[in-house]
């Protein structure tokens, strides 16, 4: 199996290739670093356009190879430049051609350093892909360690679409610890000290946390009927907003956050729901969006 690492010829960033190599260290799979060159489709018999594309393709291939050659330890990562009508379409074509287990992309250059941000390509892919889509935080560096822990974000309609099972299967395949986190955003006054409102809020959150833990346990027990699932950590992370709730989770190097596809997505496709989108933009670790079961 293969992991496709998408390279942006305009930004020349190594973040998606760094993450793809790190995942490959965990899974033993091959990484292909690929750049997609947009052209009119179907191709026209235009000598001027063909000459221009040959020039751009050669420059792109050179830039891509330079990034791969600069990776520490010089891992074996073949490169290719693929022509297609659009970059998202080209990446999906490559994923199908090489039977990719995942497509890995970088964050938008307009995003915060160290955070995940969707650009036009990633935005389209997370709504159309039939394989997991992993997104590296902006500026994500090369790491010699494998992925050590997967954190599945539990909550909302995505959980009815197979995230718990997918996370359990992935943690087993990757030999990584599994943690399931439920995020809750609480009003500002809930953090301001003792009050009647805060006490009532604490009670509601406690009841919700217990119900959530019970739901997760039921889903895990169903998965354990068919799959050996190691011990799973379950936590509830709260904050006055989504940013604080995500930051309060506690993250470490070697972590990956798993998000489930939203209920509006088609079966076996990735679709980023509204809650998942809010969590994603505040993640300090790579994010992998899983297709619906």
Image: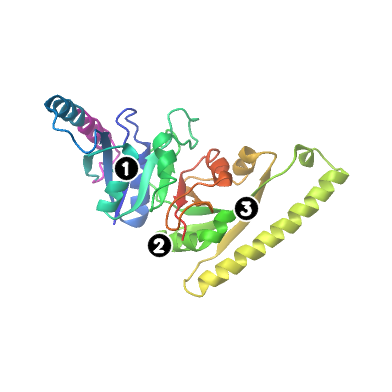
Q: Residues within 10 Å of mark 3 (few under 14, many from 20)?
A: many
Of mark 2 and mark 1, the one earlier in the sequence is 1
Q: Residue at x 32, y 37 (%)?
A: 87
Q: CA distance from mark 3 to mark 2?
A: 23 Å
Q: Secondary structure at mark 2?
A: helix
Q: Is residue 160 magenta?
A: no
Q: Where's residue 52, x and y in %?
A: 17, 25
Residue range corresponding to the magenta coloring: 59-76
Q: Where's residue 156, x and y in %?
A: 61, 53
Of mark 3 and mark 2, the one earlier in the sequence is 2
Q: Residue furthest left?
A: 47
* Residue identified by numbered label 1: 89
- Nearer the observer, disc 3 or disc 2? 3
Q: Where's residue 135, x and y in %?
A: 43, 42
- Relative depth, front residue between 96 and 231: 96
Image quadrant where residue 56 sits: top left
Q: CA distance from mark 3 to mark 1?
A: 34 Å
Q: Are marks 3 and 2 in contact (CB under 8 Å)?
A: no
- Relative depth, front residue between 234 and 39: 39
Q: Are marks 3 and 1 in contact (CB under 8 Å)?
A: no
* Residue identified by numbered label 3: 182
Asked whether residue 19 is in view, the answer is no
| Horizontal side, residue 49 vs residue 71: left or right | left
Q: Could you tell me what secondary structure mostly forms the magenta stretch?
A: helix
| Horizontal side, residue 24 vs residue 46: left or right | right
The circle on residue 173 is: 2
Q: Is residue 71 magenta?
A: yes
Q: Secondary structure at mark 3?
A: strand
| Horizontal side, residue 22 vs residue 51: left or right | right
> Can you say whether 184 is above or below 54 in the image?
below
Q: Residue at x 55, y 55 (%)?
A: 158
Quarter of the picture holding the N terminus: bottom left
């Amino acid at each position: 199996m293969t992991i496709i690492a998408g390279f942006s010829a305009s930004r020349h960033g190594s973040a998606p290739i760094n993450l793809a190599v790190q995942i490959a260290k965990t899974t033993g799979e091959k990484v292909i670093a690929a750049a997609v060159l947009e052209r009119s489709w179907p191709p026209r018999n235009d000598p001027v356009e063909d000459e221009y594309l040959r020039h751009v393709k050669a420059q792109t291939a050179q830039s891509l190879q330079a990034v791969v050659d600069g990776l520490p330890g010089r891992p074996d990562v073949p490169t290719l430049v693929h022509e297609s009508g659009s970059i998202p379409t080209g990446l999906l074509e490559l994923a199908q051609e090489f039977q990719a287990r995942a497509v890995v992309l970088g964050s938008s250059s307009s995003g915060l350093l160290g955070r995940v941000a969707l650009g036009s390509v990633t935005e389209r892919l997370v709504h159309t892909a039939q394989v997991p889509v992993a997104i590296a935080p902006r500026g994500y560096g090369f790491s010699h360690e494998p992925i050590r822990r997967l954190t599945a974000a539990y909550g909302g309609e995505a959980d009815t679409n197979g995230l718990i099972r997918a996370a359990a299967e992935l943690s087993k395949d990757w030999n990584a610890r599994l943690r399931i986190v439920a995020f809750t955003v609480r009003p500002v006054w809930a953090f301001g000290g003792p009050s009647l409102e805060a006490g009532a809020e604490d009670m509601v959150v406690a009841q919700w946390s217990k119900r959530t833990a019970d739901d997760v346990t039921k889903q895990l027990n169903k998965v354990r009927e068919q799959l050996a699932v190691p011990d799973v950590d379950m936590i509830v992370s709260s904050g006055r907003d989504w940013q604080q709730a995500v930051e309060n989770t506690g993250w470490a190097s070697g972590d990956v956050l798993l998000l489930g596809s939203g209920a509006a997505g088609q079966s076996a496709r990735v679709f980023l729901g509204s809650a998942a989108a809010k969590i994603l933009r505040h993640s300090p670790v790579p994010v992998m969006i899983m297709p619906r079961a």
